[in-house]
Image (cartoon, grey):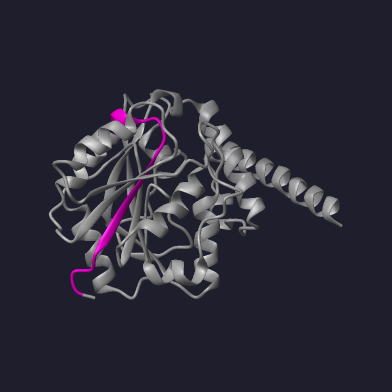
Amino acid sequence: MTNPMVSVVVCTYNRVSDLREVVDDLLAQTYDSYEILVVDNNSTDGTPHYVQEKIKTAPRLRYCLEMQQGKSFALNTSIQEAHGDIVAFMDDDCRVPPEWLEALVAAYCETEADAVGGRIKPRWNGRPSWLTLRLYHLGILPGTFDRGNSRCAVDWIPGGNMSFRRAVFDQVGGFDTDIGPVGNIKRYGEELAFCAGALRAGFEILYDPSVWLWHKVPRKRQSLSYVLHHAFGVGVANSLIQRPVNREAARAMHPLKVLINMFTGAGRLYGLALRRRTKSLLM
């Protein structure tokens, strides 16, 4: 595959100030064969006006409105609207280096991967004192992702920096609209469930550290209470999609990591109870 067309999708909801930054970053990419598709999930903050005005001077930028609230609905609309051989996704509060797309395409051209994700670095608004570098590398902070300094196979890639060949959607379908964020309600698991389906279908998922970007970590996401709440939500999502327990992560011995694993485990139990209750109601 030489110079494949890439559709870069940014699903957004009421974050026009952040959206301006990531769109400017994407317009400055060194790779040339791509489009930017902004999927507006019913924003009320001026997002439509900003994008429509920006399109006048940026022809590779496109706008699409998805009025059904929920990120999974927006993701599925983007799959239908995207023109690319590769469809890449990022969050609207990310920042991207100019070589991001070039590195992404190289990962596809140099490997047999069907999906590629990369490192997500935190973009701090002042790093909290309790979060040491050791804790950061344990992977406890929501919105970050790091699997080391070498390419490797993984079982999932996070929605803030994930991409798939078109053939994956043709076979697996879209994202589960029963899970994932809805407006300002934080729910998790839409990318986990999709990656699980891709693996079951025989597709390969690759982590490449050179395909990196920044993800904004506002102060409200830097508190321990937010981290634990997020861990519980991830546990619920893991249970609902029946994702196997990560035994290696569960053996982590740092006290804070143990605490986070406990909240994730509690979320799994809660999700299991939900599945059993739903099953009993349907019988």
Q: Residue at x 28, y 32 (%)?
A: 49
Q: Is residue 97 visible?
A: no
In this rendering, is residue 222 above or below 77?
above
Q: Residue 6, percent across and down?
A: 26, 61
Q: Quadrant of residue 170?
A: bottom left
Residue closest to the eye, 180 or 70: 70
| Direction from residue 57 to residue 141 in the image, left or right | right
Q: Quadrant of residue 122?
A: top left
Q: Residue 3, percent across and down?
A: 18, 69
Q: Is residue 219 visible?
A: yes
Residue closest to the eye, 261 or 175: 175
Q: Quadrant of residue 42?
A: top left
The quadrant the N terminus occupies is bottom left
The quadrant the C terminus occupies is bottom right
| Direction from residue 258 to residue 63 in the image, left or right | left
Give the magenta part as a residue range: 2-18
In magenta stretch: residue 15: yes
Q: Residue at x 51, y 34 (%)?
A: 183
In this rendering, is residue 11 above or below 191?
above
Numbered-mark total: 0
In this rendering, is residue 230 above or below 273?
above
Residue closest to the eye, 156 or 263: 156
| Direction from residue 52 to residue 184 in the image, left or right | right
Q: Residue 82, percent across and down?
A: 34, 58
In magenta stretch: residue 249: no
Q: Residue at x 47, y 54 (%)?
A: 76
